[in-house]
Amino acid sequence: RGEEGSALLSFNQVSLRYQPGLPLALNAVSFHLQRQERLAVVGRTGSGKSTLAVALFRLCPLEEGQVLLRGQNLAQLPLDVARRSMGIITQDPVIFSGTVHYNLDPFGEFDAEKCSAALEQAQLAESLELETQIDQAGANLSVGERQLLCLARALLRSPKLLVCDEATSSVDAITDAQVQKCLRNAVRTFDASLLTIAHRLVTVADYDKVMLLQAGQVKEFDSPGKL
Ligand code: ATP
Ligand code: MG
């Protein structure tokens, strides 16, 4: 099928359980995400939304099925190669104590100019500089700034897929809108695709596709207007 052939990301009948004896957290999940497409994933707590990221980042082996990125089976790629083409912004971003520069590029892989550009793209250039010191766990940053710093770190690596586990109540609507705007720009700038685990209705409304999960299964997959 054409849709599948050109997809940036495909889940093909993916089933995953966290441990033997536990129920399936994902149960035969299939969907495709095209280049520059933005997919919002919704569903009740425990429905398997974050487990999609677990499957993507290979934090737990699949019981069945495949995840394909640009037609390549993720399970057959070296782990670092598989992860390098994806960026993730979680609800609880990992922030190191040290400079902003260190947070963006702990292994010194990029030049300072590129790091500054990433800060700019994540709309952080006005509030932070590369030499700004960050306290342990980002204590001197707001939750929104931590997310944007995480986004800047992901953008530095020109990801083909961005995964965002949208923050819940701890982030105000303005910050949330700011993060969404940066994500949208990133999709264009990097020719990337976006998978957002959405907790806010406003997020869903402006996405290309919405997927509803229920007990680890895909219940709906359509454009937001049709749901
Ligand atoms: P929320 O909206 O609360 O974030 P979610 O849709 O992201 O929920 P998941 O975290 O994907 O839900 O969890 C799906 C199922 O897998 C749940 O039943 C959950 O209890 C279970 N689960 C999640 N993480 C683990 C884990 N590390 N070990 C065992 N079971 C887990
Ligand atoms: Mg979750």
Image (tube, grey):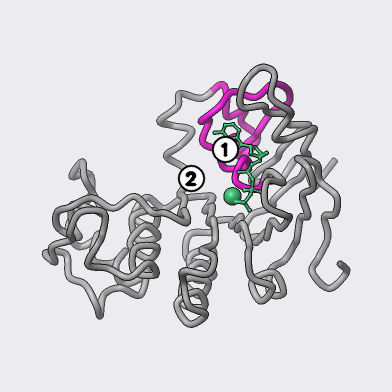
How packed mark 2 is, by other alpha carbons closer than 10 Å (few <14, some 14-19, many 20 or more), is many
Q: Which residue is drawn at 46% across and 77% down?
A: 178
Residue marked by disc 2: 86
- Badge 2 marks a residue whose secondary structure is strand
* Left or right, 40 with reference to 158: right
Image coords of residue 105 (percent x, y) = 23, 49
Q: Which residue is drawn at 68% across and 28% down?
A: 16
Q: How many marks?
A: 2
Q: Which residue is drawn at 65% across and 33% down?
A: 67
Image coords of residue 148 (percent x, y) = 38, 66
Q: Nearer the viewer, residue 45 or 28?
A: 45
Q: Nearer the viewer, residue 185 or 29?
A: 29
Q: What stretch is highlighted in magenta?
A: 49-76
Q: Which three-letter amino acid code belongs to the residue tagged 1?
A: Leu
Disc 2 vs disc 1: Cβ atoms closer than 8 Å?
yes
Q: Is residue 65 magenta?
A: yes
Image coords of residue 221 (percent x, y) = 82, 55
Query: Looking at the rendering, in which quadrant would you find the C terminus?
Result: bottom right
Q: In which quarter of the image is residue 106?
A: top left
* Left or right, 47 with reference to 55: right
Q: Which three-letter amino acid code belongs to the residue tagged 2?
A: Met
Task: Reply above or below: 113 against 127.
Answer: above
Residue marked by disc 1: 56
- Earlier sequence position, callout 2 versus callout 1: 1
